[in-house]
Amino acid sequence: MQAVRNSLPRHVTSMYKNINRNFAANTLAFHFLPGGALSNLEKLLEVFCTKYGPIIRLEGSFGAPTLIFVLDAEASAQILRGENWIPYRPGFASLEHYRKTIIPNNSDQTTGLLTEHGEPWKKFRSAVNPIMLHTKTIKLYSKILNEVADDMIARMRYKRNSKNEIEGKFDVEMNLWSLESIGVVALGGRLNCLDPNLPEDSPARKLIQTVHDIFILSNELDFKPSFWRYFATPTYKKAMKSYAEQTRISEYFINKARTEYKSKQTNDDEKGILEKLLEIDERVAVIMASDMLLAGVDTAANTMLGILYLLAKNPEKQEKLREEVTSHSGSKAYLKACIKESLRMMPVVAGNLRQTTKEYNILGYTIPKDMLVTFGHQYLSLIDQHYPKSKEFIPERWLVDKTDPLYYGNAHPFAYSPFGFGVRSCIGRRIAELEIETFLAKVIENFKVEWNGPPVKTKIAAINYVIGPYHYVFKDV
Ligand code: HEM
């Protein structure tokens, strides 16, 4: 059996090298491709797949690892299932370095879901799963997430100009909403990110700034070429400071929440995620809170940016959603379908990643042990073979029955994977869905969303970002 093909024409090999120079260990970093737009990546993968087949090897260079692209749903299924005992997903290298080497006496301590692998990851995940994935506990946040959504709607009205556009950077606005939302879960209370009069020196404002800095800095260190592994670069120093600051402020909020919990008697049914995590171990609570703040802000914010864009471009679908939302029937079927469809077309994570723990022989290729493999689910969910009329926003495909050619169940189940797969899939999925459902329903109830400009641009850094200029228009319903 031949090892994964790498007998490529010279120009393609050199293009690969360019790619790999910018490729870091945990995800795709294709923003440097000409134009930096996501469509380029899709086109590139389409060309690769047609020319070289569904399994492609990108040779590593300049310290970046070699990467295998899997662009076949069944092959993805075989590897992801084969790796589902203790999945190894490398990444967040600078954060891992901070948690394992910079924090004193921490080398033998668990550091959390984003930075652990193997048995330590499994132990941590087993401890937090029953709390983080408990439907009843998640539902406790409905009321407060409604309040956050109401406040965000008020903020949007306040920020709107005479043309019904939001002044300033709309992505930052969405980040404030998502940080406020995940803050109530991770830190047990409101951060007041949405308050225009929040004092400059408040811990909340510092946390907002620190989380923002971390997104920028970790992207620089983890996904772009950098010498921080050899010496302390200025970006490295800033990142270490930000990681420390985030831990310090998280501890501050958690201690505050702990004091409040102590003064009131709550029965088990009313205890939220933070309260329950604190009962396991304060360390676990602080780490989990930090990871929620890191993993839960840009992801939810960019998902919202994508959904609002797709609904703006499909006014009749938006109207249908508005009918459901304003009927107050309690049904969320179309709302959920719109979110699923949006995550199919504009998923925030383009490709899941695993490091193989054994050799695989698939489709005539050998994928050795210890290879980084990325599964191109965004590519797969945008081809007609899996989703007919794949480039069209059709939420109905998630609702129709088997007899309809659009029925989503006709697609291979591994063609769609916005929250990852198996035991290592997104632990914040239910929280994210509740946040997004709550806020999206309010937006559609209050505003007719339009897009007044050329097609939206996206870029891939650690995740898919919807980038400006933002041409959203929010007219009163
Ligand atoms: C729409 C929003 C979100 C999307 C699309 C998303 C997507 C993902 C994906 C694809 C993964 C990798 C899964 C895998 O490797 O199989 C992941 C992991 C993770 N996500 Fe999310 N996520 C979202 C929101 C959130 C939120 C709100 C939180 C906060 C609780 C969160 C916390 C995490 C954590 C901690 C992990 C690592 C899990 C582990 O390794 O065990 N995510 N997410």
Image (tube, rainbow, N blue to C red):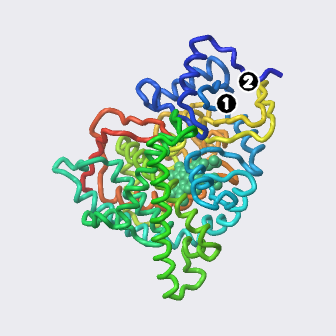
Task: Give the side of residue 63 with respect to residue 259, left or right.
Answer: right
Residue nearest the observer in this picture, 107 or 45: 107
Residue at screen point 55% across, 68% down: 138
Q: Circle 1 sits in a helix, a strand or a loop, which is it? A: strand
Q: Position of residue 118 (x, y in %)?
A: 74, 52
Q: Which of the marked residues, 1 or 2, is nearer the chain's N terminus? A: 2
Whether residue 131 is situated above or below residue 354 in the rendered picture = below
Q: Give the residue at the far top of this rendering.
A: 10
Extreme-left residue of the structure: 162
Callout 2: few (<14), some (14-19), or many (20+) C-alpha neighbours within 10 Å? some
Q: Which mark is residue 68?
A: 1
Observer able to see residue 198? yes
Q: Residue 468: where, in percent of width, then height?
A: 33, 39
Which residue is identified by label 2?
4
Residue 61: quadrant of the picture = top right
Query: Residue at image x 66%, y 64%?
Result: 129
How many numbered marks, from 0 up?
Answer: 2
Residue placed most toward the observer, 319 or 42: 42
Q: Quadrant of the N terminus?
A: top right
Question: Does 230 sit above or below residue 150?
Answer: above
The residue lying furthest to the front in this view is 231
Query: Label 2 near label 1: C-beta < 8 Å?
Result: yes
Which kind of residue does numbered mark 2 sit on?
Val
* Mark 2 residue element: loop
Mark 2 CB lies closer than 8 A to ligand 1:
no
Q: Is residue 429 visible?
A: no
